[in-house]
Image: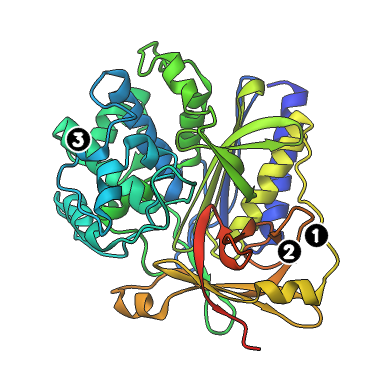
């Protein structure tokens, strides 16, 4: 190892430790692929209750970054002629029933892959740990509302990816987990990537942490999602495995041993824009699954993930052959840690400076138009304003918490937000959602009827009382 490489590794290690301390994250793991070399930096512990040092092989939950595996597995079936992107999903899941029969007949595989299906975020239901979990989830979609016509707009949907998992099952004749393992994990040699708790518990793994009633970090007691949510968020993996996954995505569709998993064109098609996104820190468009974004003059493909007190971020810069993976086990500090670690890596290795836009000075009269409550099927956003600032709070609906059999992620208390120069766009400037961007939607009359945050639409349910 050269002196320059030694110096770069030391700077990565020091910076990761400093950022973790800044945001009070118990344990973090960061991997970087730059100039044809891997570098890793870890800090802290897997659990405050039962602490073990985090290393590059420590398993963290990937949450929604699992969707990149689901989408790539589907693309393998597309390449083999077993699935068509423009085919109605009912060709592969004939049992699908939705409240909107027209939507159920018209939603295509591509609509699911690029979040333009018009399906709401998710069905919060536990369909058990059996091999029929996804079949049960799809049956529960009979109660899932639509937020728009198929193909009309992008709105991030966990349910859409769980439905894609059922496509994989019906086409391959395997369970979703077996299909992903045979199509991707095994040929790529990702031996530290798992769906099952029984596999994870025999390795070193991180647990999530949320703030308790006293404001102190405490272990999140519900470790995993339900099996029916596996296609949209069920994997656990190490930073080393996720970085290897990123390297495959940067490549030409072949494994390191030379086995071709995907034609180069099919793999690279996943990073071509299929639909635009507006006012989102996650990106300015969707490819096939991947968020597409410009950061400091380079194009990135990205995907994050969150579970109960854990967060992951995966960012690739194909034109520079670069990737960074950041993992954190704190529900309050995880998002800002990952964002800061990724930004440090982009600047240090590529000279790319990724900055948030500056909000406008606070205008109480303008802000009043947006004050109110907004919701989707599982969460409520509350926008409040006074003479000083506009704030945003995010909470899981009480009825969802009450119906849950286990602990759920913590709510985000009110935090400052600022309006941006672009019409009706905003940025959260403090708290656990710091840096998150979105926008307010209007109807034909100009009335505010919704808010987009995290790529998801929340419909307005109440305006501020006069």
Residue 205, placed above or below residue 273: below
Residue 322, placed above or below residue 290: above
Nearer-the-camera pick, 251 or 461: 461
Crowd around label 1: few <14 · some 14–19 · many ≥20 (10 Å): some
Q: Is residue 33 left or right of residue 363?
A: left
Q: Is residue 54 left or right of residue 33?
A: left
Q: Which residue is mark 1?
A: 359
Q: Marks 3/2: CA distance? A: 45 Å
Crowd around label 2: few <14 · some 14–19 · many ≥20 (10 Å): many
Q: Is residue 292 left or right of residue 134?
A: right
Q: Is residue 123 left or right of residue 97?
A: right
Mark 2 and mark 1 in contact? Answer it, CB < 8 Å: yes
Which circle's residue, 1 or 3, is located before the other in the chain? 3
**Which quarter of the rendered picture does the C terminus lie within?**
bottom right
The residue drawn where x is 26% and y is 48% is 104
Could you say which disc has been placed on residue 91 in the image?
A: 3
């Amino acid at each position: 190892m050269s002196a320059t490489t030694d110096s770069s590794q030391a700077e990565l290690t020091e910076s990761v430790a400093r950022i973790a301390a800044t945001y009070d994250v118990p344990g973090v793991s960061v991997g970087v692929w730059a100039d044809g070399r891997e570098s890793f930096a870890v800090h802290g512990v897997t659990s405050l209750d039962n602490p073990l040092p985090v290393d590059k092989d420590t398993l963290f939950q990937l949450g929604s970054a699992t969707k990149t595996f689901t989408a790539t597995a589907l693309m393998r079936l597309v390449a083999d002629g077993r699935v068509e992107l423009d085919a109605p999903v009912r060709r592969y899941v004939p049992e699908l029933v939705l409240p909107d029969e027209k939507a159920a007949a018209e939603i295509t595989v591509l609509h699911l892959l690029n979040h333009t299906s018009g399906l709401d975020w998710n069905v919060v239901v536990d369909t058990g740990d059996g091999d029929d979990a996804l079949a049960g989830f799809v049956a529960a979609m009979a109660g899932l509302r639509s937020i728009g016509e198929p193909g009309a707009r992008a709105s991030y949907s966990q349910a859409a990816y769980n439905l894609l998992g059922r496509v994989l099952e019906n086409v391959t004749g395997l369970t979703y987990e077996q299909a992903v393992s045979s199509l991707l994990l095994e040929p790529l040699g990702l031996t530290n990537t798992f769906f099952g708790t029984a596999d994870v518990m025999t390795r070193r793994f991180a647990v999530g942490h949320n703030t308790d009633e006293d404001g102190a970090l405490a272990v999140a007691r519900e470790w995993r999602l339900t099996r029916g949510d596996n296609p949209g968020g069920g994997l656990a993996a190490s930073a080393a495995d996720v970085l290897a996954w990123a390297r495959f995505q940067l490549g030409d569709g072949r494994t390191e041993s030379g086995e071709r998993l995907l034609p180069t064109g099919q793999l690279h098609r996943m990073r071509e824009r299929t639909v635009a996104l507006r006012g989102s820190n996650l990106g300015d468009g969707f490819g096939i699954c991947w968020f597409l974004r410009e950061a400091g003059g380079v194009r990135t493909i990205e995907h994050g993930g969150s579970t109960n007190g854990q967060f992951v971020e995966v960012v690739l810069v194909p034109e520079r052959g670069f990737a960074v993976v950041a993992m954190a086990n704190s529900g309050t500090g995880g998002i800002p840690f990952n964002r800061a670690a990724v930004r440090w890596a982009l600047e240090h290795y590529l000279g790319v400076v990724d900055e948030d836009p500056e909000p406008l000075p606070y205008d109480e009269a303008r802000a009043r138009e947006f004050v109110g409550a907004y919701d989707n099927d599982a969460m409520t956003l509350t926008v409040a304003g006074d003479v000083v600032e506009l704030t945003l709070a995010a909470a899981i609906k009480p009825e969802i918490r009450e119906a849950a059999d286990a602990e759920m992620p913590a709510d985000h208390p009110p935090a400052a937000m600022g309006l941006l120069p672009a019409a009706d766009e905003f940025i959260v400037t403090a708290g656990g959602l710091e840096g998150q961007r979105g926008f307010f939607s209007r109807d034909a009359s100009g009335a505010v009827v919704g808010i987009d945050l995290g790529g998801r639409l929340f419909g307005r349910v109440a305006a501020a009382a006069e």
